[in-house]
Image (tube, rainbow, N blue to C red):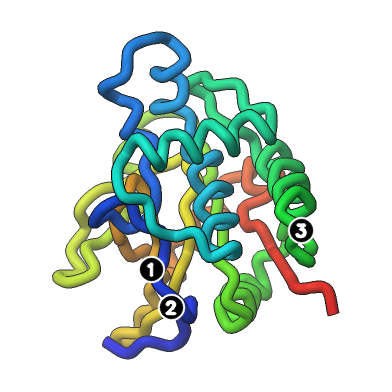
Amino acid sequence: MKKIISLKNEYVSVGSSFGGNQNLFGSDKGIINKGRQLGGCGVVALSDTVSYLTGDVKFNDPAQYKKNFKKTARRILFVPTRFGMTFFQVLFGARHLMHKNELNLRCRMAFSKKDLYTRICRMLKDDIPVILCVPRIYGRNITARSLPFYDPVTLKKVTQTQGHFVVATAVYIDGNDIYIEISSWGKRYFIKYGEFRSFVKKHPISLLGYMMEITRRR
């Protein structure tokens, strides 16, 4: 497997994790914490992206990370429910956080699938994490129809998901397959670029946005 491009520095970690994890709220009591656990992936994606861009990537324990999560949630007016955030909420949250942290970056939604690979590589080259939205799907056999996640070592499918925000940190190639390295639930996974592109093309809800394009203001 060959690495094509990646972020230049170490990614966010909570202890030994790879990125933040909304499931850290799973052991906390109360309906608000339940909402943070079930619908907090958008907050995690935003919080981790800003943490990386500001160089604040080391969280020693879950308590420290949860404090940062709550700070981000307050700033973007996140309402903790199992339904999480829409892409529009993530977009406006990102713009507010960039301004609040004095980051000279422009955020916009990506609609066209044609230049998806180019945009991902361009952002990583600029050392900017890529927030991707795995669209929500409806109907029968949702689990079987969800987007596969692969183990980065064995390249075997280990789980799948839909209606979820992840953060892309690198791109690899193995034979004819392009893999995107992602952070999700505090773990490192791969998704296949071709499968992700087909997934967002197949499900109409992706028309509301499936990728946060963040660029540096020149």
Q: CA distance from mark 2 to mark 3?
A: 28 Å
Residue 42 % position (x, y):
54, 41
Judge from the rendering whether residue 2 lies leftward or rightward of residue 134; answer left or right: left
**Residue 102, disc:** 3
Does residue 117 appear anywhere in the picture? Answer: no
Count of all numbered marks drawn on residues in the image = 3
Relative vertical location of residue 110 with respect to residue 172 in this rendering, above or below: above
Q: Residue at x 45, y 26 (%)?
A: 36
Res 126 quadrant in image: bottom right
Label 3 residue SS: loop
Label 2 residue SS: strand
Residue furthest toward the left? 154
Quarter of the image for the C terminus: give it: bottom right
Amino acid under disc 1: Glu
Q: Residue at x 39, y 36 (%)?
A: 22
Lower position in the chain sequence, tag 2 or tag 3: 3
Residue furthest toward the right? 218
Amino acid under disc 2: Val
| Closer to the eye: label 2 or 3 | 3
Which residue in the structure is indicated by mark 1?
A: 181
Quarter of the image for the N terminus: give it: bottom left
Q: Residue at x 30, y 60 (%)?
A: 188
Q: CA distance from mark 2 to mark 1?
A: 6 Å
For the residues bearing labels 1 and 3, Cβ distance under 8 angstroms:
no
